[in-house]
Amino acid sequence: MRPGPNGAGLSRDVTQGVTLFTDLVYTSRDERDGRDTVILDAGVMYRPARNVALDASVVTSLAGAAPDWTVRAGLSVRFSR
């Protein structure tokens, strides 16, 4: 069985509809000669409507084999009543 990631996150509403967030994720090595990985993610989420959210974040590797930095953006739509 491979070990899974462990993480912690914080978020804070700064205005109605805007949230700042950060996540710290630790993943143990997959192979005997591999390295553990620690990644930090920080970003903002905007909710212009009840069922719509836009988000953007910057991700950086603090330790291990991962990209030095990455930019992410996304759109989430909830389809429900």
Image (spheres, rainbow, N blue to C red):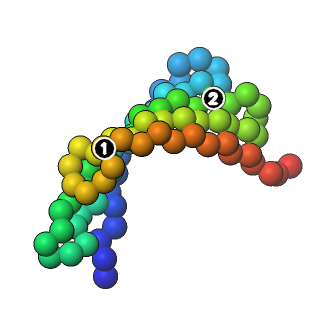
Q: Which residue matches tag 1?
A: 68
Query: Mark 1: which secondary structure?
Result: loop
Residue 34 visible, this orientation: yes
Q: Is residue 34 above or below residue 41?
A: below
Front disc: 2 or 1: 1
Q: Residues within 10 Å of mark 1 (few under 14, many from 20)?
A: few
* Residue pictured at 13% horizontal, 72% vertical: 33
Q: Residues within 10 Å of mark 2 (few under 14, many from 20)?
A: some
* Residue pictured at 47% horizontal, 39% vertical: 71
Q: Indicate the quadrant where residue 65 lies.
A: bottom left
Q: Indicate the quadrant where residue 27 lies.
A: bottom left
Q: Position of residue 48 (x, y in %)?
A: 73, 28
Q: Position of residue 20 (x, y in %)?
A: 49, 28
Extreme-left residue of the structure: 33
Taking depth in this image into account, of 76 and 14 the one nearest to the observer is 76
Q: Which residue matches tag 2?
A: 46
14 sits left or right of 66 in the view? right
The alpha-carbon separation of the residues under discs 2 and 1 comes to 26 Å
67 sits left or right of 50 in the view? left
Amino acid type shown at disc 2:
Tyr
Taking depth in this image into account, of 43 and 19 the one nearest to the observer is 43
Amino acid type shown at disc 1:
Asp
* Residue pictured at 18% horizontal, 68% vertical: 34
Q: Is residue 14 above or below residue 57?
A: above
Q: Position of residue 59 (x, y in %)?
A: 39, 41
